[in-house]
Amino acid sequence: MIPITRVGATLDELLAQRGVSRRSFLKFCTAMASMMALPPSAVPAFAQALAGARRPSVIWLSFQECTGCAESLMRSDATTLEQLIFNLVSLDYLDLLQAASGTAAEDARARAMAESYGKYLLLVDGSVSTADGGVYSTAGGKSNHDVLMDAAKGAAAVIAVGTCAAFGGIPKAAPNPTGAVGVSELIKDKPVINISGCPPVPVVLTGVLAQYLAFGRIPDLDALGRPKAFFGDTIHDRCYRRPFYDEGKFAKTFDDEGARNGWCLYELGCKGPTTYNSCATLKWNAGTSFPIQSGHGCLGCSEPDFWDAGSFYNPIPVGAWGSAATVAAAGAAGAALGAGAALLARRHQVEVEKKS
Amino acid sequence: MSGLANATRERGLLAPRAGNAKALLRELLRLLDDLAAGGTGGSIDLMSMPFAQADYEEMRDVLGVGAIDARLEALGESRVQETRYPGIWWVRHCNEDRETVAELIEVCDVPSILRAPAADVVYAAAQLRQVLEAQARSG
Amino acid sequence: MTLLSFARGIALEVATMVFVLGIAWRLVGILLLRARRDHSAARRHDAWKGLMMTATRSWPKKEFIGASGFVEAISYTWHLALFATILLYAPHVVLLQNVVEAFLPFPVVGRILFYWPTLPAGMIFFLASLSSGLLLIAFAHRLINPVKRLISNFDDYLSWLLTLAPLITGMAAYMHVGGPYQTVLAVHILSVEALMIWFPFGKLMHLFTMFAVRGVTGVLFVRKGAAT
């Protein structure tokens, strides 16, 4: 499971200890660089930097979440390449996997925070309830909000894992009874990296951690605080069905001829053009497939408020129309105005004719 | 994963062709020319390409398999095959669940993953020295 | 609420209401006007020939081609390219289908009425850039030619700007330049809504009135016995 190794050892030392050969490490770095969209020529430098990195402490807090994000990331405890990075960080607190619970667990967390004060990475999944003092989501008598603000004080950086932690996600969907918000709305004095997605692509998190370990800094972030290396392109721009979009070949219904031929799913509601994520290149289950490849349009799950953005099956150009009644009323009003204007004009015409 | 992959292949992904294969093959030719002229060659990361299955298979068909087929056990299997064209290598890294984690086409005289790392060589020399000394002692 | 959901939601609804209200106002206002009764006898009785003037008077006569042929050609080209861009681009067709579906009781009508083949996106981009380029040339002509400049007014300039803006923003959205895609798309939709709001109140109404006017003029000419 998660081994206890002293914080502060370099990755190199840890690998040697675990019997991981340098070839394996180079293979890992090649895979990581590929996921992070670094060019293959950058692998030697990346490997060298990562080898000399020191093992940070990581604290993981779970709030209003479905646990899908954690499951997505931790579904396997074999030392696969993607999981290597997790086995190399000192995961000092994660209530999902740790053996301790109750006050023992809370004590462990407090101890870890004290030991690495100012240096630990705080990973958060799930949104934070703020309505009515945050009573709608509590653990151990403390509201999520208070736990978050307390833990953030000593964090070097905060990583919001999943759309719920990044932007509020499904708890924030209308009518948002718990006053759910994303982490970045509450934490303003520490760097917050948003790794959105419902759930996020697992290797994005490992890639961000690898980048943090190797280069010691936060990756470049876009306007929504997401790492540009993974969220810089839309699904549309990297979709293998893009040639069909450009040729105008669309599937009109599910399982029609176009759908069977793998044509573009734009008319079936695919939100690929307005969604930034790496699903089209990194895919899911280690490159097996992603929604579009499986015949279903993108839901846009890495964007804020995607639950409230209208039907998943309405294509992007479709408006969020109110009702036909308002437009019909406008038409009637216009006709009335026109009739009125015509009436005035006719009277004027009659006057002019009489005069002449 | 293989079952799912086969299923998706059968589902009609054979038909669409994004046309990326030809562009990539030209790029490989450019890198090979560079290597032939004494340059460093380069690598192309296949995982970041929007490949349709047909493009992938076209690449495989054109490049073929050459004289060398190396298997590497390092946190899962890796396969390094020289293609029909010496200098163009197809490298595929898998994890312990046999899932592909990286796939590259390298244009070089030998991929760096096959080279023995310098630190490992030093360590190996020390180990072998120990073994020989132990043998000598025991007779 | 993001800019995109605003553009697709309430802004679209308001723009449509103003558009419909304005068009109804102006068309009803024109149609209910009294026509001056012609008490003389008709000289010719083939009134349908007069209606044909809608087509026959859509291109200058031989004698006038030298003076106005060039500008007419540019004008026709950018108009046709614009209509092709609007009507032959798949996402636009999807929108039109949806508009009809939203407002008619039988949604399938939208699919039937607005179901025609579309052009590949690259060709649409070419047509949009052609239309934009020619619009700019036409604008330059309007500014350079002293007569045109004298008679140009606010209506002319605003109509030109609001016609060009959706073309430029649409191309920017397609190319994914100018900012995050959602923002550029929202600006494109808002520019179309601005055009919709201005449409009924300026010279753009010629879309509805032009053909009818030519036909009516033709019928009157025929009654008077003029050659068509």
Image (tube, coloured by chain):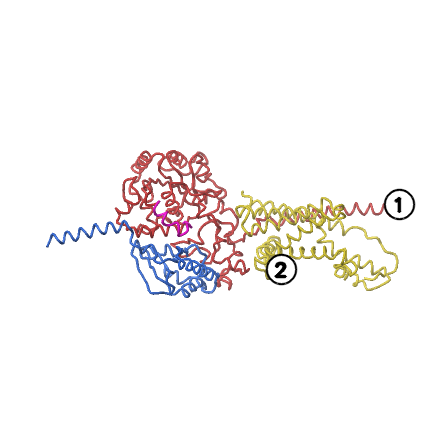
Chain colours: A red, B blue, C yellow
User: Chain under label 1?
Assistant: A
Q: Chain of mark 2?
A: C
Nearer-the-camera pick, B99 or A135:
B99
Which residue position is annotated with label 2?
Answer: C113
- Distance CA(mark 1)–CA(mark 2): 51 Å
- Horizontal side, residue A320 vs residue B91: left or right: right
How dense is the environment of label 1, judged by Cα within 10 Å: few (below 14), some, or many (20 and up)? few
Element type at mark 2:
helix
Relative placement, left or right, of C77 versus A31 is: right
Q: Position of residue B71 (x, y in %)?
A: 30, 60
Taking the image as shown, residue A65 lies to the left or right of residue C31, namely left
Q: Are marks 1 and 2 in contact (CB under 8 Å)?
A: no
> Magenta: predominant secondary structure element?
helix
Q: Which residues are magenta?
A: A36-49
Residue A112 screen position, x and y as percent: 31, 36
Q: Residue at x 32, y 63 (%)?
A: B68
**Element under disc 1:** helix
The one of B76 and C32 positioned closer to us in this rendering: B76
Looking at the picture, how far across and down is residue C60, in whole percent? 76, 59
Residue C25 visible here: no
User: Which residue is more in the foreground, A34 or A77?
Assistant: A34
- Residue type at mark 2 is Leu
Q: How many residues crowd mark 2 within 10 Å: few (<14), some (14–19), many (20+)?
A: few
- Tell me which amino acid carries mark 1: Lys
Percent position of residue B78, x then y: 33, 57
Closest to the observer, A312 or C213: C213
Q: Is residue B36 above or below residue A112?
A: below
Q: Is residue B72 visible?
A: yes
Query: In the image, are marks 1 and 2 on the same chain?
Result: no
Per the image, the residue denoted by label 1 is: A355
